[in-house]
Amino acid sequence: MAQNLTRQIAGVTIPNTEVVQKALAYARSHSDDMTYNHVFRSCLFGFVIADKNPSLRDRDREVHAVAAVLHDLGWDNTGELVSEDKRFEVDGAIAARAFLDQEAKEWDPRRKQLVWDAIALHTTLSIAMHKEVEVVAITQGIMADFAGPDGVPGGLLTWDEYREIVKALPRIGLVAGCREIFCNLCRTKPATTYDNIVSQWGEKYVEGYTLDGHKAVDSMEIYKLEDWP
């Protein structure tokens, strides 16, 4: 596993291996400017945070970098990687696995699975934060791009570090852009949103969108299995 090649961006050292370079290029080819900057910032934030945390420091840095920069392939602005029937996180995980099968044939199944898990679970914090150290580090970096330094426990990301990274990779209206992406998912494939965070944007902003009849409690009560003989 070649991890001796590195590069520094906004004061943060990350792997610069061939697969990381190809992952960045792949993310760039399937992302608008806002999304590309977001995934790249998430990678850098994650490295800052994890490198200061003794429990996360000893991780697979190449896996971390690749999963972070590929984590939003499910937002693919070309449409090539977007399914009609899967959550965007799963679309992204599947696309990342296909990328690794093509570009990282030497990776063992466990490393590929870590990437898949990190991407598929990155919006499900109650699970992701109890997974392997790579998944935790990736998730924390992504969340830092939405919560900022004050939302990172332990002061592991300073405002100076945050500002340096954002200066290199501007936010370009991330919050508004996410709202449009999530609302579009609620409009175009609502069935993939009912059981996850995307539904919150649907309920708040999308006319006609409703969770009525789509909640787990609805299913349990509709089937009335206790009434069967």
Image (cartoon, rainbow, N blue to C red):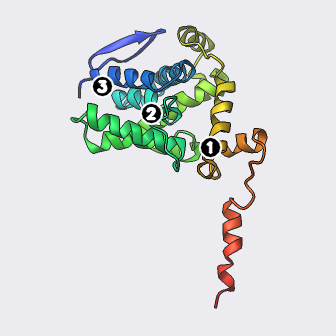
Residue in view at x 75 percent, y 58 percent: 212
Which residue is label 1 attached to? 188
Which residue is label 2 attached to? 55
Residue nearer the viewer, 47 or 42: 42
Total tally of numbered discs in the picture? 3
**Along the polypeptide, which appears first: circle 1 or circle 2?**
2
Quadrant in which the N terminus appears = top left
Q: Position of residue 38 (x, y in %)?
A: 55, 22
Residue in view at x 38 percent, y 41 percent: 114
Residue in view at x 26 percent, y 18 percent: 4
- Mark 3 or 1: in front is 1
Image side of residue 217 versus residue 169, left or right: right
Give the class, few, some or many, for how many residues have Cα within 10 Å of label 2's Cα (few <14, many ≥20).
few
Residue 23, picture quadrant: top left
Q: Position of residue 126 (x, y in %)?
A: 58, 46
Image side of residue 149 versus residue 79, left or right: right
- Element under disc 3: helix
The dot on residue 19 is 3
**Along the polypeptide, which appears first: circle 3 or circle 2?**
3
The dot on residue 46 is none
- Mark 1 or 2: in front is 1
- Element under disc 2: helix
Give the class, few, some or many, for how many residues have Cα within 10 Å of label 3's Cα (few <14, many ≥20).
some
Q: Position of residue 77 (x, y in %)?
A: 52, 29
- Element under disc 1: helix
- Residue type at mark 1? Thr
Quadrant in which the C terminus appears = bottom right
Residue in view at x 71 percent, y 65 percent: 218
- Residue type at mark 3? Val
